[in-house]
Image (cartoon, rainbow, N blue to C red):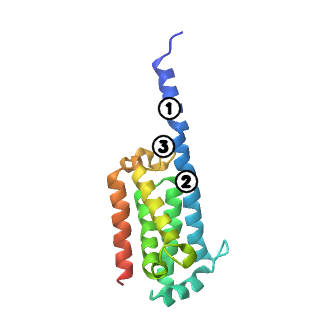
Amino acid sequence: MTTTRTDRSARATDRALSGSAADWGLLLIRLTFGLLMAGHGAQKLFGILGGDGLTATGKAFESLGYRPGKVFATIAGLSELVGGLGLAVGLLTPLAAAALIGVMINAMALVTGSGGLWASDGGVEYNVCIAVVALGIAAIGPGRLALDRFFPWGRGGWWPAVVALGLGGIGAAVTLNI
């Protein structure tokens, strides 16, 4: 029995769409991490999922020195919501990662930095983990089971990682200096 070019092409397409174990593993990480981060942003913005909502979060941000607190709470909440959703579906992955990295740098600088390393002491552990996972996904790429699979940054690499870390750092620096 001979196989035609169409048959081989169809099998190759099926393999590409089904993905490897690494692609499915990345999807699992992206969905879990991204949706949890999106939920964290929704807590800030909408007061759902046990969150305090924008007014209370804005007051908390003001107590940290962010003025006007509600504006900065909105920026943080949108960064977590949109960044989390972007990572979950693998869309504009370097920018989604940058949004989360920027928020975590701010959290480390003004909230958890004085607590040392461990979260049990109020330290940076949790924030570092979030920033590193986001950066790692940008560096590795979101995998073939992502909307970014059609774009050059969808394969990961040094440039998507540099963009994620650079834009996250710049965003955090601007926010910390306003």
Counting the numbered discs, the total is: 3
Q: Residue at x 51, y 43 (%)?
A: 22
Residue 164, horizontal then vertical, whole percent: 38, 61
Q: Mark 3 or mark 2: which is in front?
A: 2
Q: Contact (CB < 8 A) between labels 2 and 1?
A: no
Q: Amino acid at mark 2?
A: Ile
Residue 35 position within the rendered picture, expressed as x and y whole percent measured from the top left: 58, 61
Secondary-structure class at tag 3: loop
Considering depth in this image, is 127 or 89 the residue closer to the camera?
127
Disc 2 target residue: 29
Q: Is residue 92 visible?
A: no
Disc on res. 70: none
Graded by Cα atoms within 10 Å as few (under 14), some (14 to 19) or many (20 or more), the crowding at tag 2 reads some
Ranked by sequence position, the earlier of labels 1 and 3 is 1
Callout 3 touching callout 2 (CB < 8 Å): no
Q: Which residue is mark 3?
A: 144
Q: Secondary structure at mark 1?
A: helix
- Residue hosting label 1: 13
Identify the residue shown where x is 65% and y is 73%: 48
Q: Residues within 10 Å of mark 1 (few under 14, many from 20)?
A: few
Q: Secondary structure at mark 2?
A: helix
Disc 2 to disc 1, how far (Cα)? 24 Å
The amino acid on which the numbered mark 1 sits, given as a three-letter code, is Thr
Distance from the alpha carbon under mark 3 to that under mark 2: 14 Å
- In the image, residue 64 lies at what x, y percent? 48, 87
Tell me which numbered mark, 2 or 1, is placed earlier along the sequence: 1
Name above or below for residue 149 compared with residue 46: above
In front: label 1 or label 3: 3
Is 171 drawn above or below residue 141 in the view shown?
below
